[in-house]
Image: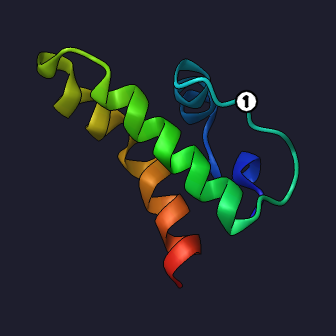
Amino acid sequence: MNLLNKCTNNEIELLKEAGIIIEDKDYTKEELERHESKIIEHIMSQSSAQIQKLHNQYSNIFRVINEYLYN
């Protein structure tokens, strides 16, 4: 799946904040699993007051990744 084509510009910026640079390519399931883990690590490294807010911001990215991984 080409994550760049599935994400909005805002979501691409969120991924950059998590340390993920998205390329215009088809990602393997393993690569997407690593990205998902990195997003989770990024969220959990923030203050507890920010975790829910960040989870909501990244929720569509999680949905896109999980639709590909589990369908």
Q: Is residue 1 left or right of residue 24?
A: left
State whether residue 7 is above or below residue 26: above
Q: Nearer the viewer, residue 41 or 65?
A: 41
Specify the quadrant that holds the N terminus: bottom right
Identify the amino acid type marked 1: Ile
For residue 41, what is the image quadrant?
Answer: top left
| Residue underneath mark 1 | 21
| Vertical side of 9 occupied by 32: above or below | below
Q: Residue furthest bottom?
A: 71
Q: Residue 43 at x, y = what percent? A: 34, 29
Q: Tell me what residue is drawn at x 67 percent, y 67 percent.
A: 29
Q: Secondary structure at mark 1?
A: loop
Q: Counting other residues with Cα less than 10 Å from the Cα at mark 1, is it few (<14), some (14-19), or many (20 or more)?
A: few
Q: Is residue 22 left or right of residue 33?
A: right
Determine the image quadrant of residue 33.
bottom right
Colour style of the rendered protein structure: rainbow
Q: What x and y, as percent, mark residue 26?
A: 84, 60
The residue shown at (41%, 27%) is 42
From the top left corner, tell me how far across and down residue 2 is, in percent: 77, 57
Number of numbered labels in the structure image: 1
Residue furthest right as drawn: 25
Q: Is residue 29 shown above or below 31?
A: below
View extreme (left): residue? 49
> Up-down: is 23 above or below 25?
above
Q: Residue at x 73, y 29 (%)?
A: 21
Asked which quadrant contains residue 28, the reply is: bottom right
In-front residue for pair 58/9: 58
Residue 19 image position (x, y, % from top left):
60, 23
